[in-house]
Amino acid sequence: MIFHHKDVSPYSEKIRLMLGYTGISWSSVQAPLTPPRPSIDPLVGGYRRIPVAQKGADVFCDTILIAEEIARLSENPQLSPYGQSEDLSAFLQELETDVFFACVASIPVLGVIKALLQQVPLQAIPGYLQDKKKLMSDKHLIPTSREDAKATWQQFLDQLESRLASDFLHGYTPGIADFSAVHMVWFREKMDRRQVFKDRRLLRNWFHRMAAIGHGHRTDITTEDALQIAAHADPRKISEEMKRSALIGATVAVGPTDYATQATHGELVGEDENRWVLARDTQVAGRVHVHLPKRRFALTRLA
């Protein structure tokens, strides 16, 4: 698997730990802190979120589909965001919406500066912050006050503490709930460690167990390497079941509905209950298939 990511990205950390846990060897392509991103943009067009995964000429957007791909490749169904219990699915939905935005909106200013100085070159910080401000202003969500965000974030940490009856959130081995929660704690631990773990011994121990998993077998490759791999591969065959939609063959745009709503354009060549697959003919990589989730994404027919 080729993984296009940023070291400072919490959602990238979620996938890095999943790759470490499953033992899947992966190739790392470091994306620039802000667009343009030459390893990603030619493949996916308008879509601008990080991270993105690549298998040959197939590109997987959003960690929902990347996690599903890792679960499939490693034969670990407990890592899939799909097909889980009603309680777990509701918990994942909460993590991906209310908790994530509360985590970001309640960040202490001094903590941001401290964390960025550790991870981002000084001269890049103004542009990085400006890009993040633009990214979060492009959202279709009900605004949350800072005080409400702080309360939601603290409730989430308390909820994790109360759920940790075992080593992990749902037993003695980590599952999708652990990886979907740990990256936010990882993100905030760098900024306000004392507040995160204050009076939460189980949470602290769980976090250290998760962090100890590590990132596994990583090899660094260049942007040119990743694009050449796509150019010399054929996209994964689309099953007949995924060709039954009335929109197959239509030109469509698919993009997120919550934030960073820029869409990817292409020909719809596959669809099931969880994803759309768009074919794109690119100058640098030939024909690629871009996989986009249906959860919090929308499709618009263009022609």
Image (tube, helix red, strand yellow):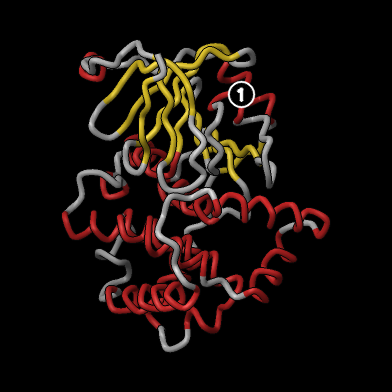
In this image, 268 relative to 145: left or right? left
Q: Quadrant location of residue 296?
A: top left
Q: Residues within 10 Å of mark 1 (few under 14, many from 20)?
A: some
Judging by the rendered image, the residue that carries numbered circle 1 is: 42
Q: Quadrant for the C terminus, please.
A: top left
Q: Residue furthest bottom?
A: 199
Q: Looking at this view, is 135 or 76 the one in front?
A: 135
* Residue type indicated by callout 1: Pro
Image coordinates for residue 163, horizontal then vertical, percent: 27, 73
Q: Residue furthest left?
A: 86
Image coordinates for residue 51, horizontal then vertical, percent: 53, 43
Q: Looking at this view, is 246 or 41 the one in front?
A: 246
Q: What residue appears at the point 53 percent right and 12 percent down from the top-left corner?
A: 281
Q: Quadrant location of residue 236?
A: top left
Q: Quadrant location of residue 175?
A: bottom left
In this image, 32 relative to 147: left or right? right
Q: Looking at this view, is 119 or 213 the one in front?
A: 119
Task: Check disc 1 and report its element: helix, strand or loop.
Answer: helix
In this image, 211 relative to 202: left or right? right
Image coordinates for residue 186, horizontal then vertical, percent: 52, 65
In this image, 95 relative to 290: left or right? left
> In this rendering, is residue 75 above or below 150?
above
Q: What residue appears at the point 20 percent right and 18 percent down from the top-left corner?
A: 241
Image coordinates for residue 159, horizontal then vertical, percent: 31, 75
Q: What residue appears at the point 48 percent right and 67 percent down from the top-left corner?
A: 103
> In this rendering, is residue 128 above or below 235?
below
